[in-house]
Amino acid sequence: MAKLRVPSWLQSSNGTANANGADEADRKKQNRLSLSGLAQFMTKGDQPTQASSVTETEPDTTPAPSEKAPKSSTSHMIDLAKKITQETEKLDKYLKDNDLPNPGFDVDAPGDFPKLPADIQRSRQEVVYATRELNALVRGPREHVRWGVWSFLDTLSLQLINSYGIAKLVPVDAPIELAVLQTKTTLDPINLARSLRHAMTNHIFQEPTPGFIAHTAASRMLAEDGPLQDWVGFNSEDIFPAAAHSLQSLRTHPEGTELTRTGFNFAFNTVDKDPMFVTFGKDPERAKRMGGAMASLTGGEGYEVSHFVDNYDLSDVDAKEGTFVDIGGSHGFVCVDMGKKWKKTKFVVQDLQKTVDSAPKPISSDEDVAQRITLQAHDFFTEQPVYGADVYFFRWIFHNYSTPYAIKIIKGLVPALKPGARVVINDHCLRDVGLENPWDERIIRSMDMVMLAVLNAQERTETEFRELFKAVDERFVFKGVSRSEGCRMSVVEAVWMPESVEKTEAEVVEESKEEQKVETPAEETKEA
Ligand SMILES: C[S@@+](CC[C@H](N)C(=O)[O-])C[C@H]1O[C@@H](n2cnc3c(N)ncnc32)[C@H](O)[C@@H]1O
């Protein structure tokens, strides 16, 4: 029988079941939510494989309290406000107890939260979810929609400020008169003032006395953090125009799968000419900015490479001195970190010629690691040249492509695969609505929209990944999806088993689980 699981964000923040009646009712509601979310995956012999950092519960068909019990005497607004107070107090106490600075808007406030222990991080997340929900609630539905659609103006003011480098013109230690600031930029006075004053409504810059501009902690980040400037530039100057043209692209080409018929192509007059990556390849400044933006993203919370390196079990490959191929692996930083952990595995990093040429030499200062890594120019839309490797790895690749392209990439692997070869995809994997925590849900769903705008591509659900492999070749056995605590990216895995066409997929998965039990403490590496 399939096991039903409750996502960790739905559990009480101390991680224990609460005996209190209201919490018990919530728990039942939540179980029902996870049941409905998972039901579509549960065909016979087919168990959900994602959502692993979870508790097992029996199915609960009891109606939620709102369907049968009298309404609670406190409003949802008050429940949220109480939760915000409770969880903020825990966060505040932790910061005080550990002599850590308080968050603030002033210029000298910390740029990031310190790394928090799991329970305090959960409190922090609860505050984020509850404040957002309370905000929507007290604004009311109509106002929420009315002003929500203006969120693009946040991007517009940031775009102008970032593009004209205004943050760097404001001294960190003292306010500057607006009239003086106006002399330091080619942005005209009216537009300078209005962009700044709009950004101030988002706590970016402040005006301590009329006519004087000073930094906040956020605007100081914008002045000092190069990758953050790239992130804002890439999003506001490349993705923002692309998003604004997505409607036009979909009206003109409703199938929405072509790499050269995207919002980006319409925005930059490259329809039926170049995909976005090719456009960037022709413009080194823009390419560099995108590289910086990616560095800012992947250095941020939830995207650290360490999640994969720490949790992916390569012990069997390492024991036999096997080979790991990182396809579209950029400058090979994943392999460098993997090579430090797995001392006998050989690595091949494949990317386009230009990227290979610009990789650091040596690729790692650790000589032993460097000599086990080979860089190779390879276009992943063509046949894979490394035959008989143990792992073919793709990180941040598949979400850049719609299904016809994704199928082509996997097809290119088939001639090179030996029985047992693993195809490992490290990307977002969309969970059913209600199963993701609201913070991650918003970021991952936003990334999915970005993929539409720039590449007619998409994030995928577990079922969509499964179907992708099935569409390429029945001899792939889909092993499932795992995700480590605190990480937004999942590990999706399929194994090439030519003999498996004789068996059902469930039988093969069962067999390979049995093998893993003998070889490795598999559950330790599979987490979600
Ligand atoms: C979003 S980046 C991901 C890089 C890296 N895997 C990571 O985790 O950050 C996509 C990578 O795919 C490479 N790429 C794009 N098209 C390619 C192609 N046709 N063949 C091989 N690599 C390609 C790009 O040069 C880039 O390094």
Image: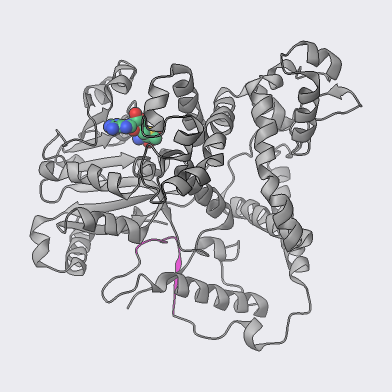
Height in image: 142 above or below 111? below
Indicate the quadrant where residue 2 lies: bottom left
In this orientation, which residue lies closer to the viewer: 505 or 354? 354
Q: Write down the quadrant of residue 90 in the picture.
A: bottom right
The quadrant of the picture occupied by the C terminus is bottom left
- Would you identify the image quadrant in which residue 114 lies? top right
| Rendered residue at 76%/66% (across/down) | 77
Q: Main secondary structure of the magenta part?
A: loop
Magenta residues, start to end: 49-58
State the image coordinates of residue 42 (x, y, percent, origin top left): 34, 73
- Residue found at the far top of this picture: 183
Q: Nearer the viewer, residue 505 or 307?
A: 505
Q: Residue 56: say if magenta.
A: yes
x, y (%) of residue 185? 73, 14
- Horizontal side of 381 relative to 56 (left or right) equals left
Percent x, y of residue 415: 10, 43
Q: Nearer the viewer, residue 90 or 404?
A: 404
